[in-house]
Image: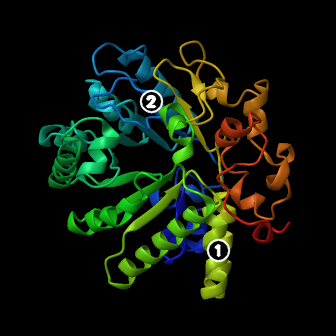
Amino acid sequence: MIGISKLYCGQAESSDALRYGRKSGDLPAHLLQFSADKKPVVVWNMTRRCNLKCIHCYARALGEDGTDPLSTEQGEALIDDLAAYGVPVLLFSGGEPLVRRDLPHLAAYAAGKGLRTVISTNGTLLSREKARELKTVGLSYVGISLDGGREVHDRFRGVDGAFDRALRGIENCQAEGLKVGLRFTVNRRNVSEVPTLFALLLDLRIPRICFYHLVYSGRGSDLMREDLSHAETRALLDDLMDRTRALFDQGQPKEVLTVDNHADGPYIWLRLLREDPERAGDVLQLLRFNEGNSSGRGIGCISWDGQVHADQFWRNHTFGNIRRRPFSAIWDDPGILLLSLLKDKRPHLRGRCARCRFLDICGGNFRARAEACHDDIWADDPACYLTDEEIGI
């Protein structure tokens, strides 16, 4: 994650992270990306079932009926292992995690073990009663996905009324004091909806939004040709910075982040070099703390069937299964070649990535996109929009 509000608007300083020793167990949530120990944040796609039919679903979710391969008891054993291993955050995702009736129990179990627990949801199943239950069990945060205004969102989600039901889910979380934010996956079909999302932040008093760059995975692979061009991505970043700064200057600051393209960090720094060189120095230090893409290192994924992956988008590479071996044992196994290589990608990258002066703060960006486009894990990420001149070659 790249925090536009943190970096561009000065809502975080390098001294903030240093004050806590940069230990993930001690850092507050908004500084977690700057931790030094890099115990992985774990995304558990606890079900493949979903009540919507999203055209960009990376999990290629199925209908909401049926059962899930991992039982409640197996979920508890997984949480026991993650807590003992020192995982700082467990994100429940899907499919749609709220189709699992045991989600509140498992969230409570994880919170009781000291894990920060969050969910990624489409928001349509968040009744007032469910929001109250999730708040009571200690859930920290609810991220609700929107793809634009009513017409655009419902078209992406494949179900009429999904937008209105998601807004009711937001309102129900707020009524119960449960922190809620937005998630928005950008592509050519909805980039014009960015102003709508910022208007919702203000109108609904939502404190946080994450803008996700498209990753070519699952049904998202079918949208590869709908990804933004490099020029369009640069325009998007400038627009996000301008809008975030405007809110900050108006005394209505929001936490605005981008996800899944670590070229955003250098791009923000390059703009600050022109506008505020003194601030740019501190931002460069924060970016070095962040270290860029951390698939297979600072983030990991467990699928609905127990398979372990480097991240939630890269499912064609599997490192083991938690039904046969604990996640912690898999994650630290030096005999799993790709997983070991991902701990430090820099010696293995080729092309522009290998020669880029920002490699230590980008981390080589997204290997899943490189493989999807070039059939080569170590090739350039095609979504890097920085010029050769900017990256120093």
Image position, residue 374 (x, y; %)? 74, 38
Left or right of residue 34, residue 51 in this image: left
Left or right of residue 127, residue 37 in this image: right
The residue under the point 55% across, 72% down is 7
As drawn, 173 above or below 256: above
Image position, residue 252 (x, y; %)? 31, 77
Which three-letter amino acid code belongs to the residue tagged 1?
A: Trp
Crowd tier of the residue under label 1, counting other residues whose Cα lies within 10 Å: few below 14, some 14–19, many 20 or above: many
Image position, residue 164 (x, y; %)? 17, 47
Q: Locate the C terminus and report the quarter of the image it occupies.
A: bottom right
The residue under the point 50% across, 25% down is 303
- Which residue is under mark 1? 269
Residue 238 vs residue 251, the one in the foreground = 238
Which three-letter amino acid code belongs to the residue tagged 2?
A: Asn
The residue under the point 67% across, 82% down is 273
Left or right of residue 200, residue 94 in this image: right
Can residue 276 be seen by looking at this rendering?
Answer: no
As drawn, 245 above or below 338: below
Left or right of residue 330, residue 53 in this image: left
- Which residue is under mark 2? 45
Report which quarter residue 101 is drawn in: top left
Residue 77 vs residue 93, the one in the foreground = 93
At mark 2, the secondary structure is strand
Work out how far the residue at label 2 is from the one at label 1, CA to CA, in angstroms.
34 Å
Residue 189 vs residue 138, the one in the foreground = 189
